[in-house]
Image (tube, rainbow, N blue to C red):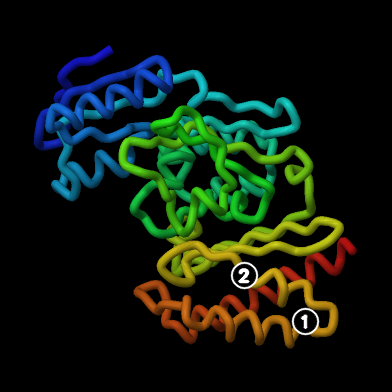
């Protein structure tokens, strides 16, 4: 399906809604060959906002919501499958992965959550990408449509602060191992003022029988994983672990309007203290 769309965006563009992954990929390549500037589209919240002020310019949009694989949301075959075009609201209400649900409920207000897709949050230009945090610390992979067909990549390979995709590739779905879905978890978000706001720091953690895994965002330019080696070191006490983590992450810490570098380190120290205390209680 295709057509011309008129919106509050101050320029016209062509609209395509393919019904398969192959059709979407071919559409993008054909548009490039014809000197067009195509964009893949899921929820479109960031695309529309940026286009209104001409932060981005395009002449073709390929809507991925008509592709079945981009809309799946189910636990099957030992994995939680989340299509890239699924909204944060739907994922939270499904609640198959409580840590992910709690994280995305704090990304925006309920109205906006119903428009933002998980693919859009992972691929967007807004640096926080909070939906990535639970995926970074779980056994997770991404299905990506590539020139050679559908590929499944470890999350750590496909995401390094932001999605690492080649031109024309698009995220199809997120796959999380079922065993990770019910692990004990910790989630803390600190904001400068309002409860629903960009994070000063958001921190998530999972605890399995072997180790604690932790990731944060808001601390610097991109989400990062905190040192698993230090967090789980058997010879360090809690205070030593916290001091070593903060020292190691010092170069990642960036002051901004939400807080100075020193203040963010202070907040992280308290968040880590709270995390260790919570996990100690559950054994």
255 or 114, nearer to the observer: 255
Q: Which residue is mark 2?
A: 226
The vertical placement of 135 against 207, above or below, is above
* SS of the residue under disc 1: helix
Q: Does residue 171 appear in this view?
A: yes
Taking the image as shown, residue 212 lies to the left or right of residue 247, namely right
Q: Please report contact status of discs 1 and 2: CB closer than 8 Å, yes or no.
A: no
The vertical placement of 228 against 179, above or below, is below
The vertical placement of 147 against 270, above or below, is above
Mark 1 closeness class: few <14, some 14–19, many ≥20 residues within 10 Å: some
Q: Residue at x 15, y 32 (%)?
A: 36
Q: Does residue 111 appear in this view?
A: no
Of mark 1 and mark 2, the one earlier in the sequence is: 2
Q: Which residue is mark 1?
A: 238
Query: Where residue 237 appears, x then y in whole percent?
Result: 81, 84
**Furthest residue to the right?**
283
Q: Quadrant of residue 256?
A: bottom left
Mark 2 closeness class: few <14, some 14–19, many ≥20 residues within 10 Å: some
Quadrant of the snapshot with the N terminus: top left
Q: Residue at x 74, y 86 (%)?
A: 239
Q: Which numbered disc covers residue 83?
A: none
Foreground tag (1 vs 2): 2
Query: Where residue 187 appears, x then y in whole percent?
Result: 65, 59
* SS of the residue under disc 2: loop
Taking the image as shown, residue 247 lies to the left or right of residue 260, namely right
């Amino acid at each position: 399906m295709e057509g011309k769309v008129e919106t509050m965006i101050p320029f016209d563009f062509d609209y395509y809604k393919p019904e398969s992954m192959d059709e979407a990929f071919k559409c993008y390549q054909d548009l490039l060959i014809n000197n067009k500037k195509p964009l893949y589209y899921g929820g479109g919240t960031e695309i529309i906002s940026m286009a209104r002020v001409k932060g981005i310019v395009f002449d073709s949009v390929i809507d991925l919501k008509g592709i079945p694989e981009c809309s799946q949301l189910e636990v099957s075959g030992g994995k939680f499958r989340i299509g890239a075009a699924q909204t944060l609201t739907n994922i939270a209400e499904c609640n198959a992965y409580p840590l992910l649900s709690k994280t995305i409920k704090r990304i925006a207000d309920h109205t906006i959550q119903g428009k933002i897709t998980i693919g859009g949050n992972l691929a967007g230009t807004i640096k926080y990408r909070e939906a990535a945090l639970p995926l970074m610390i779980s056994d997770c992979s991404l299905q990506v449509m590539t020139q050679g067909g559908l590929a499944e990549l470890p999350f750590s390979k496909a995401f390094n602060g932001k999605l690492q995709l080649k031109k024309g590739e698009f995220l199809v779905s997120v796959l999380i191992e079922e065993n990770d879905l019910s692990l004990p978890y910790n989630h803390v978000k600190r904001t400068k003022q309002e409860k629903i706001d960009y994070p000063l720091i958001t921190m998530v953690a999972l605890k399995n029988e072997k180790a604690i895994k932790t990731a944060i965002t808001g601390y610097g330019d991109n989400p990062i994983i905190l040192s698993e080696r230090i967090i789980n070191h058997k010879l360090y006490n809690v205070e030593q672990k916290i001091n070593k983590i903060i020292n190691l992450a010092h170069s990642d810490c960036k002051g901004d309007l939400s807080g100075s570098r020193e203040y963010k380190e202070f907040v992280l120290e308290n968040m880590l203290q709270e995390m260790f205390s919570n996990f100690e209680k559950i054994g």
